[in-house]
Amino acid sequence: MVLILSLLFISCKQEIKPADIAKLNGYWEIEKVVLEKGEEKEYKMNETFDFFQIKNNKGVRTKVAPQFDGTFLTTDTFENVSVRFAGEQVFLDYKTDYAKWSEEIISLSDEQLVVKNPQKIEYHYKKAAPINLLKDGEKNK
């Protein structure tokens, strides 16, 4: 029974291809965190989003704060990030002046991102868009 469940779990995992990495670019808002034992923490509203800018498997992840006019304030907090393919697994390797760490990409689509850190904590993100409460419905660029 355990073998069958293991095979089912492995077969359900999304295969992430090099062409999929471009989907990381943009603004991501955390929806929930799933701890190792399955406990979930929901995030109803976020003061900051993660902004990824990756080209040729290298780039940065920056914390940004959405503003009411649809713009973003950029913080001084950022990490250099590189994408690493290891067999069927894909990792985001982060580096700052103070630390290095990795997260495995579990799934990636145009609208959803799930990563898992070495402590087996999963971070579930949704693609974010600018918030515009001041221009009476005009679209933001």
Image (cartoon, rainbow, N blue to C red):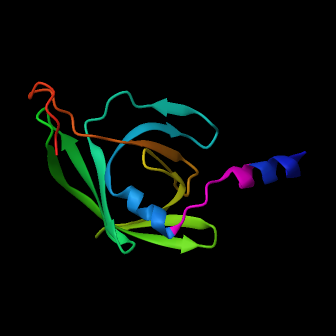
Horizontal side of residue 93 vs 59, given as left or right:
right
Q: Which residue corresponds to the image point at 16% horizontal and 32% vertical from the top-left? A: 132
Q: Position of residue 44 (x, y in %)?
A: 37, 27
**Residue 140, quarter of picture:** top left
Q: Position of residue 18 (x, y in %)?
A: 49, 69
User: Which sits in the foreground, 54 or 37?
Assistant: 54
User: Which sits in the foreground, 90 or 108?
Assistant: 108
Task: From this view, report whether residue 60 is shown above or below residue 136.
Answer: below
Find the magenta span and give its range: 9-17
Q: Which residue corresponds to the image point at 61% horizontal and 55% vertical from the top-left? A: 14
Q: How many marks?
A: 0
Task: From this view, report whether residue 34 is shown above or below residue 26.
Answer: above
Task: From this view, report whether residue 56 is shown above or below residue 130.
Answer: below
Q: Position of residue 9 (x, y in %)?
A: 73, 49
Horizontal side of residue 63 vs 123, given as left or right:
left
Residue 102 is a magenta residue: no
Task: From this view, report whether residue 56 is shown above or below residue 71.
Answer: below
Residue 13 is a magenta residue: yes
Q: Which residue corresponds to the image point at 31% horizontal and 49% vertical from the top-left? A: 50
Q: Position of residue 114 (x, y in %)?
A: 50, 48
Horizontal side of residue 70 vs 12, given as left or right:
left
Q: Which residue corresponds to the image point at 13% horizontal and 42% vertical from the top-left? A: 71
Quadrant housing the N terminus = top right
Extreme-right residue of the structure: 1
Extreme-front residue of the structure: 138
